[in-house]
Amino acid sequence: PAVMSMAVPTLDEVVALLTGAVPDVGAAATQSYLFLEIKDLLSPRATARYFVDYLSRQTAEFRARVIVLSFSPVLLYCLRRRDPSLRTMLLVAENTLTDAILEEPESLGPLAYTPQWMSRVVDRVYVWCCTSWLPDFIGVSMLGVQDRDTLVKGALAVRPTGCNVWTVNDAARKAQLHALGCCVTTDRLY
């Protein structure tokens, strides 16, 4: 069978699309944001410098719609040091190290040999840090968490008005999270 391929757009192409003529969608337009997720963990200072410089060349209206997301607290800390006005979201997931050991051990080097019980302890300590003191320390605007009750509860305790839950594809769950004050990321338009 034929394989369909599609090029991934560059950041410049996405910015051009978002800064072009946008159809009037009423009140929803005032609530739309660009979630820009950054995954570079190897050189957080250089990555922060690049993105802050890049965003500084964009219009104020565009910058106001950008929220930078990352699983890396170090990267978000570097971004906020370079531009304290930048809105950032720390992404938090359960079992990050444990899942990485099981799914892609070759990418972890010596950490791949961590006993499973120890990786679970590290994961729980990390989630506790991310849902207690770490967001204030690095100055993030929001927390983004998996749709797990324990993560949502912890995130709301730290950021009662800045919790985004992903990926919520059930309308009843979406309504429940909205009642708690959470934003949601979904694969569906409701």
Image (spheres, rainbow, N blue to C red):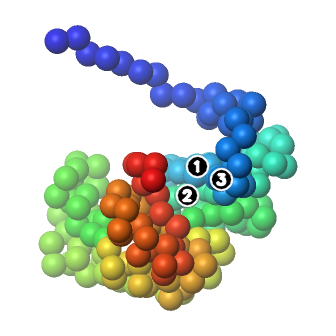
Task: Estimate how packed mark 2 is, as few (under 14), some (14 to 19) or many (20 or more) residues with alpha carbons within 10 Å.
Answer: many
Query: Which amino acid, by three-letter code, is at mark 3?
Result: Ala
> Of 171 and 143, which appears nearest the observer?
171
Residue sitting at x 32%, y 74%: 148
- From the viewer's perspective, is the residue at label 2 or at label 3 nearer? 3
> Which quarter of the rendered picture does the N terminus lie within?
top left
Q: Residue 63: horizontal and vertical position, in percent?
A: 76, 50
Position in image of residue 29 (x %, y %): 69, 49
Tell me the residue that label 3 is attached to. Answer: 28
Q: In this view, does 78 lie above or below 148?
A: above
Q: Position of residue 132 (x, y in %)?
A: 49, 87
Q: The residue tagged with tag 3: helix, strand or loop?
A: helix
Question: Closer to the observer: label 3 or label 1?
Answer: 3
| Sequence-wise first label, 3 or 1 | 3
Q: Do the residues labelled 1 and 2 touch (CB within 8 Å)?
A: yes
* Residue 126 in sight in this render: no
Residue 125 visible to the viewer: yes
Q: Distance between the residues labelled 3 and 1?
A: 19 Å
Is 138 located above or below residue 111 in the figure? below
Which residue has dot 1 on it? 36
Q: Which of marks 1 and 2 is nearer the N terminus?
A: 1
* Left or right of 63 in this view: 7: left
Residue where numbered disc 2 is placed: 69
57 relative to 141 in the view: left or right: right
Under circle 2, the secondary element is strand
Q: Quadrant of residue 85?
A: bottom right
Name which residue type carries label 2. Answer: Leu
Please tell me which residue is depicted at 26% across the width and 16% down the height of the picture: 3
Q: Mark 1: few, some, or many residues within 10 Å (few <14, many ≥20)? A: some
